[in-house]
Image (tube, rainbow, N blue to C red):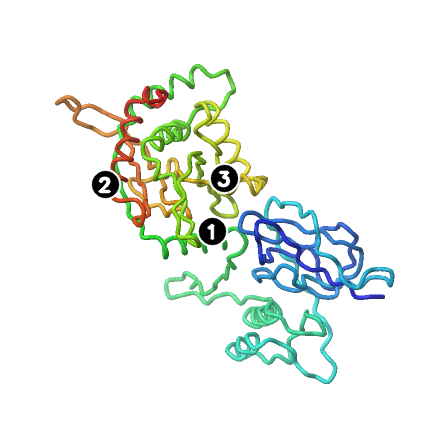
């Protein structure tokens, strides 16, 4: 028998490390070549890595949430003598639709001599929790106690060996709730959380909100939908807004820029690649409609629908999740009155759509019911002055209120 080390491959796009999302095997499992072993998360997607050879799983190089460097030890297999001692990095990862629940590691035997092997962090956590590490079974190599082993021991002790005692009723006769749940932030949600935190920390945002009379656009939208073949998807506001935004960018090109912080250069793009902020089961993703300036209204509607669907079901490619130059974000019917969207760095502008509601307005000196909607936008104040942002949003407002101008090129 021989020891076969499987290393983390280069997953592309300059990736230097990747996060363990979920293991599909556990220590002690006998697996076949090409069997899915682990799901790893990059900045853009979750990829599933298969086994390069058949063998028995000896150890796992990390647990969900851990970062592993490219070329670092991912897991170790015990194979027959004909297998190579060390594997080349696994190739051809397959994108996974969604992270699965990680399998629990099989406890390993205690190391000879009674010496407890654990990291300083694990020892400190055990001391704080009052856990004797000599009573914990380690699932790592040579019985090393890993973080999940300690957490399992703590949870087992707190639950009384798996049985949760019923809470004593309060004076009112109702039960007091004392339980907690720890939710690890993994995969796409972790990446998204890090990005929005970095964006808010590094970019001096300023918000600009303007109300827009959507009455005429709604009339046009309903008319176009009535002309659609039966069973065809209906037009939403998004393709109209995207087309109007294309026209505005032609007048105010600076809002269609990305900031290269390494070179300290603002890159203004001629092509308009619109990111569509999309809520998915794994968190927020921003699929991209490339070259929106070249698309008709119907093509925009089709492409928006295609990329957002792919983002939600986990089939979006890396290319479809990168390269946006300006982003639109919308909460649809939950859009509220005003929002303060966070810029999708390294972009410098983001346009937010709020809920459209009927309100009484003064039109030509008379009270009239109009369909009103707010645009809540954010800009990077390092590069976009307040006056320029206001001009751009006012131009967008004018085109939405006079929808025929959306289809007219200057």
> Of 19 and 362, which appears nearest the observer?
19
> Could you say where residue 58 lies in the image, as x and y percent from the top left?
75, 65
Q: CA distance from mark 3 to mark 2?
A: 30 Å
- Among numbered discs 2 and 1, the one appearing first in the sequence: 1
Q: CA distance from mark 3 to mark 1?
A: 13 Å
Q: Which mark is residue 60?
A: none
- Among numbered discs 3 and 2, the one appearing first in the sequence: 3
Query: Label 3: how many residues lie within 10 Å, few (<14), some (14-19) or many (20+)?
Result: many
Q: Which residue occupies the extreme bottom position in the image?
A: 113
Q: Are marks 3 and 2 in contact (CB under 8 Å)?
A: no
Q: Which mark is residue 387?
A: 2
Q: Is residue 44 left or right of residue 384?
A: right
Task: Please give the name of the residue rendered at 23% of the width and 25% of the height, measured from the top-left corner.
Answer: 369
Residue 9 sits in which quadrant?
Answer: bottom right
> Of 16 and 307, which appears nearest the observer?
16
Q: Which residue occupies the extreme left position in the image?
A: 365
> Could you say where residue 193 lies in the image, as x and y percent from the top left?
45, 54
The image quadrant where one finds the C terminus is top left
Q: Is residue 42 left or right of residue 396?
A: right
Name the residue beneath numbered marker 1.
192
Task: Please give the name of the residue rendered at 76% of the width and 62% of the height, measured from the top-left corner.
Answer: 86
Query: Label 2: how many residues lie within 10 Å, few (<14), some (14-19) or many (20+)?
Result: few
> Could you say where residue 357 lies in the image, as x and y percent from the top left?
29, 31
Q: Is residue 25 left or right of residue 97?
A: right
The image quadrant where one finds the N terminus is bottom right
Name the residue beneath numbered marker 3.
287
Relative vertical location of residue 298 with respect to residue 116 in this rendering, above or below: above
């Amino acid at each position: 028998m021989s020891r076969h080390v499987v290393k983390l491959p280069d997953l592309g796009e300059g990736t230097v490390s990747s996060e363990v999302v979920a293991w599909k095997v556990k220590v002690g499992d006998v697996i076949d070549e090409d069997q899915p072993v682990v799901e790893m998360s990059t900045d853009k997607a979750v990829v599933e890595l298969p086994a390069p050879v058949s063998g028995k799983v000896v150890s796992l190089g990390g647990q969900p949430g851990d970062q592993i460097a490219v070329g670092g030890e991912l897991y170790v297999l015990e194979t027959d003598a004909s297998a190579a001692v060390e594997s080349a990095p696994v190739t051809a990862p397959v994108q996974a639709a969604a992270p699965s629940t990680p399998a629990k590691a099989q406890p390993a035997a205690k190391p000879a001599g009674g010496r407890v092997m654990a990291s300083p962090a694990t020892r400190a956590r055990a001391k704080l929790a009052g856990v004797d590490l000599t009573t914990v079974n380690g699932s790592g190599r040579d019985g090393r106690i890993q973080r999940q082993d300690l957490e399992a021991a703590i949870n087992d002790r707190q639950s009384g060996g798996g049985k949760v005692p019923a809470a004593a009723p309060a004076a009112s006769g109702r039960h007091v709730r004392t339980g907690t749940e720890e939710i690890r932030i993994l995969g796409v949600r972790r990446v998204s959380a890090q990005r929005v935190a970095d964006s808010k920390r590094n970019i001096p945002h300023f918000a600009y909100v303007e109300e827009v009379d959507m009455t005429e656009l709604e009339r046009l939208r309903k008319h176009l939908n009535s002309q659609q073949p039966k069973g065809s998807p209906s037009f939403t506001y998004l393709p109209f807004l995207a087309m109007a935004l294309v026209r505005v960018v032609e007048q105010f090109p600076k809002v269609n820029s990305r900031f290269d912080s390494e070179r300290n250069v603002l890159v203004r793009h001629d092509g308009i690649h619109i990111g569509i902020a999309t809520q998915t089961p794994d968190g927020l993703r921003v699929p991209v409609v490339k070259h929106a300036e070249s698309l008709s209204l119907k093509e925009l509607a089709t492409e928006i629908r295609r990329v957002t669907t792919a983002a939600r079901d986990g089939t979006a490619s890396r290319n479809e999740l990168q390269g946006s130059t300006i982003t639109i974000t919308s909460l649809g019917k939950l859009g509220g009155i005003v929002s303060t969207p966070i810029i999708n760095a390294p972009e410098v502008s983001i346009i937010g759509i709020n809920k459209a509601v009927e309100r009484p307005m003064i039109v030509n000196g008379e009270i009239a019911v109009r369909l009103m909607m707010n645009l809540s936008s954010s800009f990077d104040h390092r590069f976009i002055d307040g006056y320029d942002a206001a001009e751009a949003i006012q131009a967008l407002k004018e085109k939405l209120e006079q929808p025929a101008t959306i289809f007219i090129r200057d």
